[in-house]
Image (cartoon, grey):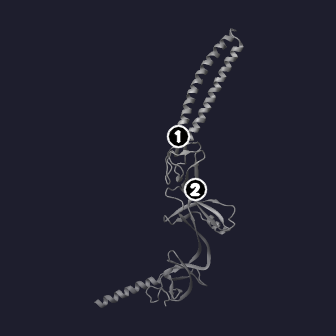
């Protein structure tokens, strides 16, 4: 009974090996892949400067912070501007009261002149006084607008959602007009510059859904063509192209490695097969047909972490079929290297 079980087990193992060896594959035409590496950069970057002089009352952001919804990053003391605004309010109130009084005088003289009880000279002087007070009030209102605008410029505003990449000042320091305060950048969208040949640019433009692989994050990022330079770089004879991510993201930053893969033309007499489909011995390689016939091929390289082999041989066609795993159930070594 024990011998019978061993025989059956051996027979079943042989059947499985034979079934595995009987599976066939078709050759896949090899399309040359062009791999180009770029690095992410901020979509836009700005350095904000102080527009007025004064002492910094507060600096509300630090390097790496995200600008809040109100956009405030720093504020310069506003004491003197607020005092000027208070003086302006008092002057405008004086002008409005003077205008009311002068208009009453003018109205009274208007009634008297119709009764021929006053001179036209007196009426003209009263009308001039009213116009002067109105002009004074208009001038004060214009000054208020100017002071309000100046007050706004004491607060340095950055676009909401941008990231702070450099800060030049601290609270308590004296600000000089045109002095840089912070540098902010928009990392919700990133630009990825590449230098491509004209052939590579055409391949890129033919792809309907573009994506790059961010190896640092181990994920693919959908992108779109943002800009194509009409000229070229004389030193490399390549065209500058910028890609941009297709949708806003919050986890992006500069310096991420972005790998762009372009599928080139189909190479003649070059194919892809699973690496296990090759019989290899002493750096020689074969494919095996179902009838046991072997066809020697040249191994050009491996892809997909060594799981796919790129081969070439004269007379190969995409319609040819070979054993998927010819080494299964045989004594022929699948990958035996020559040793000393």
The residue shown at (46%, 85%) is 327
- Residue 91 in the image, given as x and y percentages of width and height: 58, 27
The residue shown at (69%, 10%) is 118
Neighbour class for label 2 at 10 Å: few (<14), some, many (≥20)? some
The residue shown at (56%, 33%) is 84
Tell which of 156 and 217 is nearer to you: 156
- Residue 15 in the image, given as x and y percentages of width and height: 40, 85
Image quadrant where residue 45 sits: bottom right
Whole-number angstrom distance, CA of label 1 to CA of label 2: 33 Å
Would you say residue 27 is visible in this rendering?
no
Secondary structure beneath label 1 = loop
In this picture, is 107 found above or below 94? above
Q: Which residue is mark 1?
A: 77
Would you say residue 75 is visible in this rendering?
yes
**Residue 43, which numbered label?**
2
Image quadrant where residue 200 sits: bottom right
């Amino acid at each position: 009974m024990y011998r019978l079980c061993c025989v059956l087990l051996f027979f079943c193992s042989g059947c499985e090996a034979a079934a595995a060896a009987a599976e066939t594959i078709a050759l896949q035409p090899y399309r040359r892949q062009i791999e180009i590496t770029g690095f992410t950069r901020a979509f836009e970057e700005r350095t904000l400067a102080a527009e007025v002089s004064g002492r910094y009352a507060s600096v509300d952001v630090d390097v790496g912070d995200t600008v809040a919804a109100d956009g405030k990053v720093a504020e310069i003391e506003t004491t003197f501007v607020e005092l000027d605004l208070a003086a302006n309010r008092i002057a405008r109130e004086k002008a409005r009261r003077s205008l009311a009084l002068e208009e009453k005088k003018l109205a009274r003289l208007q009634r008297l002149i119709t009764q021929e009880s006053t001179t036209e000279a007196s009426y003209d002087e009263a009308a001039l006084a009213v116009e002067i007070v109105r002009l004074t009030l208009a001038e004060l209102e214009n000054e208020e607008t100017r002071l309000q605008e100046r007050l706004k410029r004491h607060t340095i505003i950055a676009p909401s959602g941008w990231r702070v990449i450099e800060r030049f000042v601290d609270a308590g320091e004296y600000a000089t007009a045109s002095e840089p305060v912070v540098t902010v950048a928009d990392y919700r969208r990133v630009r990825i510059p590449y230098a491509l040949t004209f052939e590579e640019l055409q391949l890129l433009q033919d792809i309907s859904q573009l994506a790059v692989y961010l190896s640092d994050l181990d994920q693919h990022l959908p992108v779109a063509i943002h800009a194509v330079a009409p000229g070229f770089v004389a030193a490399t004879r390549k065209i500058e192209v910028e890609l941009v991510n297709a949708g806003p993201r919050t986890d992006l930053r500069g310096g991420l490695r972005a790998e762009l893969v372009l599928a080139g033309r189909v190479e003649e007499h070059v194919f892809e097969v699973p690496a296990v489909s090759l019989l290899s011995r002493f750096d020689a390689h074969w494919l095996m047909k179902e009838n046991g016939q072997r066809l020697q091929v040249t191994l050009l390289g491996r892809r997909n972490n060594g799981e796919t082999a790129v081969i070439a041989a004269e007379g190969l066609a995409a319609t040819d079929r070979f054993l998927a795993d010819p080494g299964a159930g045989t004594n022929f070594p699948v990958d035996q290297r020559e040793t000393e």
